[in-house]
């Protein structure tokens, strides 16, 4: 945590977002230690950044491996959504996840 003009900056990523239990721990930390005006920064969960780097490197070398890596990313993110989010919000996130990963697989940039 860093202090910025009376605010705190909380940064989480990688191993601190490795699984649903870690996300719940982050929520507890934020509930206990953050204020309304604090800033929260999250980066990619678990090994997602490394997997994306691997995927890009595999695109020109081994299409099958690139596909498998993207499927691992999809499965990990889907598991997080299914275990942390309920109802319509989960459905919306899953739809967006599948669309955006599909666009990546086709070599297109997902629309923001």
Image (cartoon, rainbow, N blue to C red):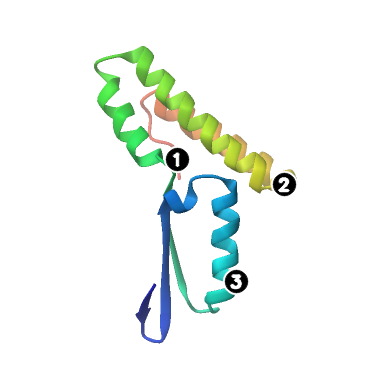
Residue 31 shows which numbered tag?
A: 3
User: Circle 3: is it few (<14), some (14-19), or many (20+) Cα within 10 Å?
Assistant: few
Report the label total.
3
Spatial separation of the CA atoms under disc 3 and disc 1: 33 Å
- Label 1 vs label 2, nearer the camera: 2
Task: Depth check: give the residue in front, 80 or 67.
Answer: 80
Q: Residue at x 43, y 49 (%)?
A: 15
- Residue at the right extreme, as displayed: 87
Task: Write down the residue under mark 2.
Answer: 86
- First in sequence: mark 3 vs mark 1: 3
User: Seen in the image, is 65 located left or right of residue 83?
Assistant: left
- First in sequence: mark 2 vs mark 3: 3
Displayed quadrant of residue 7: bottom left
User: Seen in the image, is 11 located left or right of residue 84?
Assistant: left
Q: Position of residue 4 (x, y in %)?
A: 35, 81
Q: Is residue 82 above or below residue 31?
A: above
């Amino acid at each position: 945590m860093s202090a910025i003009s009376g605010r705190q900056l909380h940064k989480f990523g990688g191993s601190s977002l490795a699984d649903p239990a870690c996300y719940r721990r982050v929520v507890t930390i934020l509930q206990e230690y953050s204020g309304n005006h604090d800033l929260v920064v999250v980066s990619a969960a678990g090994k997602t950044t490394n997997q994306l780097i691997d995927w890009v490197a595999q695109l020109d070398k081994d299409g099958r491996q690139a596909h498998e890596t993207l499927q691992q990313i999809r499965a990990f993110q889907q598991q997080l959504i299914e275990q942390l989010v309920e109802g319509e919000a989960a459905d919306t996130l899953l739809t967006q996840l599948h669309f955006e990963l599909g666009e990546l697989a086709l070599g297109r940039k997902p629309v923001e």
